[in-house]
Image (spheres, grey):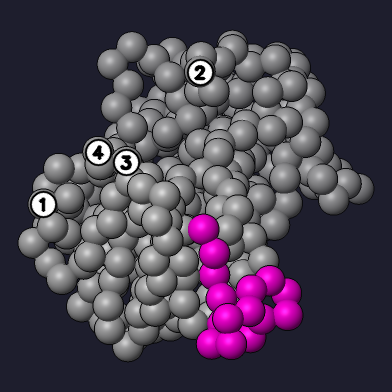
Amino acid sequence: MVTECDLVVVGAGPTGLYAAYYAGFRGLRVALVDSLPELGGQITAMYPEKAILDVAGFPSIKGRDLVAGLVAQALTAEPLQLLGRTATDLVTSEDDGVRLTLDDGTELQAGALLVTAGIGKFSPRPFPAGAEWIGRGVEYFVPTFAPYVGKDVVIVGGGDSAFDWAVHLEPVARSVTLVHRRDAFRAHERTVAQVRASSVDIVTRAEVTALRDAAGRGGAEAEELAEVEITVDGTAQVRKAQAVVAALGFVADLGPLQQWGLETHKRHIVVDTAMRTNLPRVFAAGDITEYPGKVRLISVGFGEAATAVNNAAVVIDPTAHVFPGHSSEGG
């Protein structure tokens, strides 16, 4: 069975949610597709509790609160939500629109397609020492701080995520230790300075080499996590730890999008000033796009979403106008 709509938005992060709203504002029937089971994209999956400081109108707003507002706004368009599903095959035609197939067999026929897939599908970089502890004391993401209250926490990594988690967990955890293989860090200098000034213990030229329960057991037979072994310059030391956050970054993958014939540059989709791709009736917006002077910020993605939807509206209905009028004129 084929489901018809005016616009399909692939990617339900901030840019995709705003695009869904704007499609509704333009009177378009919209379908929203995302491989994650929840709306909100990377924010929901990776940092819902973090403060976001660079969204217009909000001096500081938690990720989950920003997503909640975007979801409420997007739902005014009454989008068809197809979550936990991956877009696999795409057929485009200047005359007949686009047909998108999802991994569960769903087929969508639309007048245009907008890709707002961020960095594509992402998966955490492996943490070999803690592979058997995932979900049992080791996590890659921190959706809520509650499980870490009063615990000894070890954070592995030297990038922005590692230091951000250190900043946020230090006030609630009993202790926080940050372990990194090098003396230099990839995180923002301001955040590094903030962590250095806190009670967080930073251990460099080190790696976590083993995790054990209170009886000294590791692996599948172990019970609750109680300690970690940290090897520093070849010498092992043991630290108490009831929780480990493996903030080692993630690997982005455009997946099936790479087979659609889209022009890409370093895993990003090349677009023009109207957010058009090289394929007919296919647009893109947000972090996934590439053009001269591109800046990857949430706030930039909002503007690109509006540009893309307004230009797609004319492709879908040639009698429409690119400029939609101001929302304040609508009532």
Label 3 or label 1, whichever lies nearer to me, is 3
Work out whether mark 1 precedes mark 2 in sequence or the reverse, and give the earlier one: 1
Residue 255 position in % (x across, y down): 69, 33
- In screen coordinates, is 182 left or right of 140? left
Residue 207 position in % (x across, y down): 43, 53
Residue 63 seen anywhere in this rendered image of the structure: no
User: Residue at left 8%, top 61%?
Assistant: 197
Between residues 303 and 174, which one lies in front from this camera angle? 174
Q: Secondary structure at mark 2?
A: loop
Q: Which mark is residue 182?
A: 3
Q: Are marks 3 and 4 in contact (CB under 8 Å)?
A: yes
Label 2 or label 4, whichever lies nearer to me, is 4
C-alpha separation, residue under disc 2 versus residue under disc 4: 26 Å
Q: Are marks 1 and 2 in contact (CB under 8 Å)?
A: no
Q: Quadrant of residue 307?
A: top left
Q: Amino acid at mark 3?
A: Arg
Work out whether mark 2 precedes mark 4 in sequence or the reverse, and give the earlier one: 4
> Where does label 2 land, which residue?
266
> Where does label 1 land, which residue?
193
- In screen coordinates, is 198 left or right of 275? left
User: Residue at left 48%, top 30%?
Assistant: 288
C-alpha separation, residue under disc 1 versus residue under disc 2: 32 Å
Binning the other alpha carbons within 10 Å of mark 1 as few (below 14), some (14 to 19) or many (20 upward) gives: few
Q: Amino acid at mark 4?
A: Ala
> Above or below — where is 4 with respect to 208?
above
Work out whether mark 1 precedes mark 4 in sequence or the reverse, and give the earlier one: 4
Binning the other alpha carbons within 10 Å of mark 4 as few (below 14), some (14 to 19) or many (20 upward) gives: few
Binning the other alpha carbons within 10 Å of mark 2 as few (below 14), some (14 to 19) or many (20 upward) gives: few
Q: Secondary structure at mark 4?
A: loop
